[in-house]
Image (cartoon, rainbow, N blue to C red):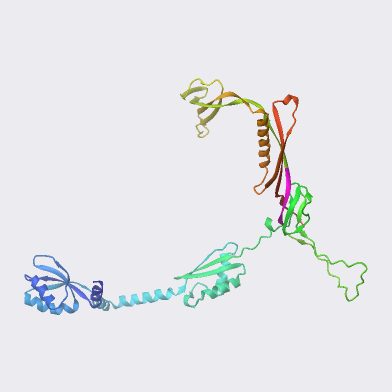
Amino acid sequence: MFVFKLLSYLIGYVSIVVRGDALERFVNMAAGRGIYLWDIKRVGRDKMRIKVRLSAVNPLRHIARQTGSRFEFHDREGIPFVMARLRRRKMLVAGAVIFFISLYTLSSFVWFIEVTGTEKISTGEVLQAAERVGLKRGALKWNLDTFQLEKEIREQLPKLAWTGIEIKGTKATIKIVEKKLPDSDSPANRPAHIVAKKAGLVKEILVLEGNPLVKEGETVVPGQVLISGVIPPPQKEEEQPGKEVSEQEKEPEKEVVDPKIVHAKGMVRARVWYEEYGEAEIVEYGRRPTGKTATRVSIKFGSKEIILMGPRTIPFKQYDVKSTVKKIPSWRNISVPVELQTEKYLEMSNYQEDRGHQGAKRLAEEKAFQEITGQLSKDTKIINRRSEEVRVGKTEKNLVRVKVIVEAVEDISKKKSFKP
């Protein structure tokens, strides 16, 4: 059906209104002669609207006379009618043609240029480099080889790592990625030693850059240089004593070479010992919450207090109090002396816990060990742990004191900048 309508539009068709008393005979005779009618609609008792191709209009005139009908044109559609209208409006056609030719001509040039990705390099530098290689406003798109332009812009600006050019319509977009040059002022590029941050016995040393000054098995102290950022020049091989060297074998004297200054990199792992003390009572006396609470909310006006919610008297003999106070914010240096106070009472009770000597010792040891683990880093590996009880005075018979010694292996290196 779509193809039929398209073909009818190309060759032209008309919408006609047929009037008469024999409309059904009119339609049947047209169908019998092979004339295709469509969109047939009755619009009255003695008239109907139909659509028919332009080439079938003359045969329909004969059918109308034979059936005593008559018809009139209601609408005309299709290319032939459009061309007829355009022939009557030659200036409009000429203007449309000129408009489309101008539009096509103008769209063949680059009129807008955008630069994206600039950080340290200015947009003006990129635009100047692009103009030097031919990419500028008014440039004909068909003469621009984007691959070659990208290459030439990178040659113009050595600081660029990548360049991409995209042309859409009359707009050219230059996308750039700048090279990430090392910052000489950054801490990672300043001269630095690797020093010990704590005392220990060197177990392992890994040097990535720098001059190692310690060996495995050596004891180091805090602040001692482990890997130096000063690399001395290579030394000449010493002559063997008693061996005469001829004049020809003697090498010419070389110039003195300065040591190389670097940012030392590496890792030094060492055995480190930690020592802490812990104490615990054999019989502990104190107070602790029973779990019962009471809350009281009140409003204070200056020295007066009005209880809004909660008990007027505290229902516990022993208790702790947690209070929160909310005040009305001041306005233009005017403060309102009104406070909303919330008090939470926690019932407390006395307790006595007898741990025994061994229980107190275990608790004291655990406290000391926790103090040590709080000083260790995540990569520290504990290889040994021992504890010993420390004697206390006669006045501290209820107290147990324990010393815990932990041996661990960890990285003891840290960076320390220096001026050459």
**Is residue 58 a member of the stretch shown in magenta?**
no
Look at the image and tell me in which quarter the C terminus lies: bottom right
**Is residue 269 a member of the stretch shown in magenta?**
yes
Image position of 384 with respect to 394: above or below? below
Answer left or right for 25 relative to 230: left
The number of numbered badges drawn on the structure is 0
Q: Is residue 195 visible?
A: yes
| Magenta stretch, main secondary structure class | strand
Q: At x 57% / y 66%, what residue is drawn?
A: 124
On the image, which quarter does residue 389 sit in?
top right
Residue 187 location (% of width, % of height): 68, 55
Residues 330 and 11: in front is 11
Q: At x 50% / y 72%, what residue is drawn?
A: 137
On the image, which quarter does residue 29 sit in?
bottom left
Image position of 279 with respect to 219: above or below? above
Residue 402 location (% of width, % of height): 71, 34
Answer left or right for 216 relative to 98: right
On the image, which quarter does residue 169 sit in?
bottom left
**Which stretch is magenta?**
263-273
Residues 343 and 82: in front is 343
Look at the image and tell me in which quarter the N terminus lies: bottom left
Q: Is residue 70 visible?
A: no
Residue 300 location (% of width, % of height): 50, 25
Answer left or right for 260 relative to 181: right
